[in-house]
Structures are given as C-alpha cells and as structure tokens.
Image (cartoon, rainbow, N blue to C red):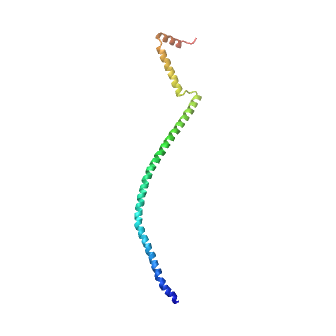
Amino acid sequence: MAKKTAVTKRVGPRIQESAQNIWRAGLGAFALAEEEGSKLFTALVKKGTSFETKNRARLGKVVADVEGTVEVVRDRTIGKVGSTVETRMAGVLHRLNIPTHGEIKHLTSRVDNLTKAIDKRPARTRRVARKRASAPPA
C-alpha cells in the first residue's frame, strides 16, 4: 500500500496541473472567441452588405426582364382574344343579317360616289331623273 500512496503523490500534482491547463485553455478560447467574434461579426456584416447590394441590382434586372416578358405575353394574349371576339361577333352579326361596320362603310362610300356622279350631271338630266324616281310604277 505504501507504493500506491507514493504513486498517487507523484501523479496527483500532474493531474491537477493538467486539469488547470485545460481550464486555462478553455478560458483562453473564450477570451479569443470574444475578441475575434467581434471582428468576425463586423466582417460578416460588411460581406452581407456587399452581397445584398449586388443581389439587389441583379434582382432589379430580373424583375425588369420578367415585367417585360409579362407585358409581351399580355399584349399577345389580348391581341388573340380581341381577334377571336371580333371573328365571333362578325359571325353572330352575319347570322342575324346585321351589316358589319365594314359593310356599312363600303355602302356609305358607294352612296357618296353615286351622289357625286349625280351632282356632276347637267341640271336638266337631274330633273328628269327625279321625276322618274317619284313617278308611280307603271
């Protein structure tokens, strides 16, 4: 038993010293983390700000591209829908025997041309034409 106490007396201070060193290393790590953590935090904030600025600019470009694409698609869609509606409306008007705007415009043009042609005739010919138009059919 005497050997055990002699070994314990020699190993005990070493264990105690190792434990103390481990404790001190932990305190040193904590102090270093506190010092470096502040620096690291500042560096991370700077990096984050730079990253945010770059990505905001890129995001702005992406949003502009998307808005342009949406506008083109919307215009195409409205054009297709508009022509489809016009075609179907023309079909409905045709079935109901209602003249379309184009047909009315064409007939108006023809009436205008006939009126001009009549106005160019001599006055005597115009009177005869009016009498024939107002005379009852035979």
**Residue 31, quarter of picture:** bottom left
Instruction: Tell me the residue at 41%/60% (across/down).
Output: 43
Coordinates of residue 1 in the picture (x, y in percent): 53, 89
Q: Residue furthest top?
A: 124
Coordinates of residue 86 in the picture (x, y in percent): 54, 33
User: In the picture shown, does residue 130 fall above or below 102?
Assistant: above
User: In the picture shown, does residue 19 fall above or below 87?
Assistant: below
Q: Nearer the viewer, residue 58 or 79?
A: 58
Image position of 47 (left or right of 135): left
Q: Nearer the viewer, residue 81 or 92?
A: 81
Image position of 131 (left or right of 57): right
User: In the picture shown, does residue 27 fall above or below 3?
Assistant: above
Q: Residue furthest right?
A: 95
Instruction: Tell me the residue at 50%/40% (across/down).
Output: 72
Q: Nearer the viewer, residue 100 or 32?
A: 32
Instruction: Tell me the residue at 58%/28% (across/down).
Output: 94
